[in-house]
Image (cartoon, rainbow, N blue to C red):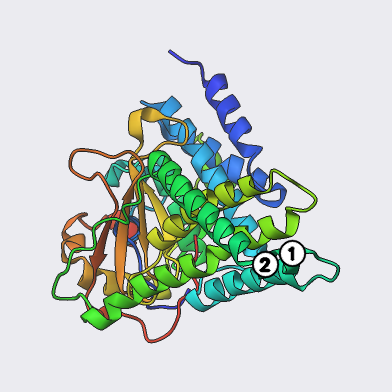
Amino acid sequence: MIPRALHIAILRNAALLVPDAERAEWLAEWKAELWYVERGATTFCIGSFRDALWLRCSNLSARRTFSVESPLRCMLLLATLALLSSLFAFGLPSRKLFAFACSPPAIEHFAFGCFWLYLESLLVLLTLNPLALGAYAENRSAPPLAVRLRRWLFLAFKIFLLAPIPVFVCIALLPIFPPAPWIVVFGWILGFRWVVADQRLRCPVCLHLLSNSTPVGSAAQLVHGSYGAELICARGHGSLYAPNIPTSWCSSQRWQYLEPSSASPRPQTCRS
Amino acid sequence: MPSQAKLSHTAAVILQAIDAGRVYGFSVMEETGLPSGTVYPTLRRLERGGLIRSQWESQTVADADQRPARKYYRITHSGKLTLAASQKRYPLLVRLFPVHAEGKA
């Protein structure tokens, strides 16, 4: 039998994650609750880490000034980065790159190199991470095809805006940093991973990021593990179940369209 | 959080449990079967959204019972409206928990 003191020690360790202002009250609540737990006290205490982590993360996200929650802001951010990197590559004075860019054989060579790097990064990306976006089964609450197509257009725009950024950075750095082409490979791998991950967490109807993430289950009693998370669209278009561990009954994330009558007329503010 | 805020199924289950009279975290865990790592963060989020309100029990009462003071959760008016909307969305929610007389008092 594990002594009570060890459980208290677990709680005290978890409390270190809690923001200072809330720590004392948080610890008092968990200690009070522990008093009533007769069986599975260790599992109970391990759950406190997730609670503490949630408090820490929610405090950090409250302080964040810029987010890509809205699809317009996301595209604006990518467009700004693409513009800045293009200015960095071609707009700076005293660059010999203009001469380089004006010679057709060099352009062909460069385009061919970029194409190969693009294929390489796609292969690496496929090896590292499945690109499936999840199951979005249609039901009677699903919006019309035109609305559902916006999701794919948005994905295409993100890829279109992101793809030139590493190339422009590479062009800008090439004269002073010979291994710069690696930036293209890693930039594309990381960038496309982000694009896919971001797309998975967006509502397929309004394209805003989903919120109110609720962890579900405790897989094998891992410290921070869970079977998955449940997220919802704050505008009421539907909910998403994203498994952390692929199972035979749910290998990828699943979206559920909800009744349009329950959609809110105005944006919600609750965030996880 | 506006009164018509949308809740995930798990959050709605927890809100329903509180409305049914499970007024502190561990009783919600026992009733719903959800682990502590799910219940407590959800309680915090519901409280930040104004759907529930927490209050520490009087130390005198706890001392009289020779136990630590508990933090009780109560559903707010806004929470009741949201729960009603969630019950329309998840119709089986109302059948999950019988109403607890003590919590309703």
The quadrant in which residue A38 appears is: top left
Q: Disc 2 versus disc 1: distance between alpha carbons?
A: 6 Å
Q: Residue at x 33, y 75 (%)?
A: A205
Please give left or right for residue A144 compared with residue B78 in the image: left
Q: Is residue A119 visible?
A: yes
The residue pinned by badge 2 equals A101
Chain for disc number 2: A
Q: Nearer the viewer, residue A111 or A170?
A: A111
| Residue A54: percent from left, percent from top | 53, 49
Q: Residue at x 62, y 60 (%)?
A: A106
Extreme-bottom residue of the structure? A265
Depicted B10 relative to depicted B66: above or below:
below
Q: Nearer the viewer, residue B13 or A203?
A: A203
Element at label 1: helix
The residue pinned by badge 1 equals A97
Classed neighbour count for the residue bearing mark 1: other residues with Cα under 10 Å, few (<14), some (14–19), many (≥20): some
Quarter of the rendering occupied by the N terminus of chain A: top left
Depicted A24 relative to depicted B79: above or below:
above
- Discs 2 and 1 carry the same chain letter: yes
Extreme-top residue of the structure? A1
The quadrant in which residue A165 appears is: bottom right
| Residue A56: percent from left, percent from top | 61, 49
Q: Are marks 2 and 1 in contact (CB under 8 Å)?
A: yes
Amino acid type indicated by mark 2: Ala
Q: Residue at x 28, y 47 (%)?
A: B32
Please give left or right for residue A165 compared with residue A154 in the image: right
Q: Is residue B56 visible?
A: no
Chain for disc number 1: A
Amino acid type indicated by mark 1: Leu
Q: Residue at x 43, y 61 (%)?
A: A212
Depicted B38 relative to depicted B95: above or below:
above
Element at label 2: helix
